[in-house]
Image: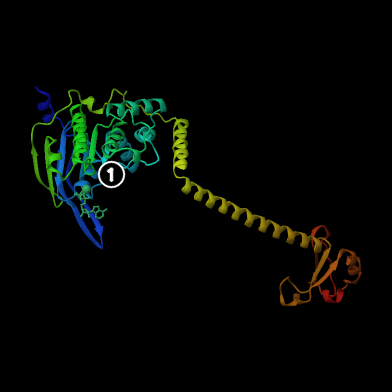
Amino acid sequence: MSANVGAAMAPPLLALRQVCRDFATGGEIVRVLDRIDLDIAAGEMVAIVGASGSGKSTLLNILGCLDRPSSGSYHIAGQSTHALNSNALARLRRERFGFIFQRYHLLAGLDALANTEMPAIYAGVPGPLRRQRALALLRRLGLGERLDHFPAQLSGGQRQRVGIARALINGASVILADEPTGALDSHHGAEVMKLLTELNASGHTVVIVTHDMQVAGHAHRIVEISDGRIAGDRRREPAVAPSRPEDARRPEAGATPVTHTHAPWDRMCAALAAAARSMRTHRLRTMLTMLGIIIGIASVVSVVALGEGSRRKVVREMAALGTNTLEVYPGPQIGTDTSAGIVRRSSRSLDSVRPRTSCSCPESQIVASGEMFASIAARSPARKAA
Ligand SMILES: Nc1ncnc2c1ncn2[C@@H]1O[C@H](COP(=O)(O)OP(=O)(O)OP(=O)(O)O)[C@@H](O)[C@H]1O
Ligand SMILES: [Mg+2]
């Protein structure tokens, strides 16, 4: 049995069943994808074509687990994505899919090598392996001389090749490309399509969204979308299947298979290095951010200092009034109407008070702060006592 027949009989790698995608806009629900049924086998090269706004990117986003269907089911290699939470979907995306965008979406502050390495950092690939793999990919894609060039120093075609290297760094078996040649001239566009065709020949499943029929002509199968529905699905020739299924998971350029590590130290170093690079690249932004932080910290320190100063002042003043103050409250309780005649005495005069507290009112009390608490059985109103 030939590999192609084998591919036709194999269960689909990506399977959409009755998938709908609705968006709520302006108070009404707009159905962008309408009951899509689509199977894509491992090793196929599929072009999704259609007019602008027909739902191509929406479909690609669902295929790449960047979005979820509003209804219907999506199975990847037989596994339903319905019950997967966002972390599980992120893991699936990281391990299985590589994305190529029309506008490249490279990080301006990172050179070609660092941009390529970026997904591997999130995948927890150890530093040396990550670098080795990125170097191999970039050299294979003809960018060996441009490793330390920033995106602004690269041509459109070179940027897109960096984008392709980045898509492959984690050994993605499925390449999802949204208008990969949309921002390129015909020469660079042809170059990128040649690369995608080679990747497909080496076992990668490739799905390309395009409105350019010349680009779609590189694919073995063309799926046409119109108003969110599949309007046509034709094969130019049977899909090229990988000779061994695991080939599709194999990273390019002789890189060793993806190895994940959860070494926090390695990830921390990579994150710090990326942060330092970003700070160096965006100096003005960094300075303004630091200024904001300094002003914030200075404000907090000032407020705390003012509060503490005020507190100490009050404490000092209270201490001056302090432990030698005697307060005499007439009446049954503090705070009642009868407490109007509060009398204060210092400790020096306490003795002079005591002899005179022969008031007849049993409810009267003498209160002193600190150690000098005195409770005197009063027999006359405190006011008189004072
Ligand atoms: N998040 C969203 N909210 C509301 N409407 C959306 C959203 N995303 C897409 N749409 C709508 O869905 C429709 C299809 O969008 P999509 O991006 O899939 O089109 P497309 O076929 O890729 O078009 P193009 O070729 O211009 O890129 C459009 O009418 C768009 O306005
Ligand atoms: Mg689009």
- Name which quarter of the figure residue 313 lies in: bottom right
- Name which quarter of the figure residue 354 lies in: bottom right
| Neighbours of disc 1 within 10 Å: few (<14), some (14-19), many (20+) | some
- Is 370 on the left-hand or right-hand side of 25? right
Residue 114 percent location from the top left of the image: 38, 34
Q: Residue at x 26, y 46 (%)?
A: 68
Depth check, front residue: 34 or 296: 296
Q: Disc 1 designates what residue?
A: 103
Considering the image in quadrants, where does the N terminus appear? top left
- Name which quarter of the figure residue 74 lies in: top left
Residue 291 percent location from the top left of the image: 54, 51
Looking at the image, residue 114 lies above or below residue 286: above
Residue 107 percent location from the top left of the image: 36, 41
Q: Amino acid at mark 1?
A: Arg
Looking at the image, residue 49 lies above or below residue 326: above
Q: Is residue 381 visible?
A: no
Query: Element at badge 1?
Result: loop
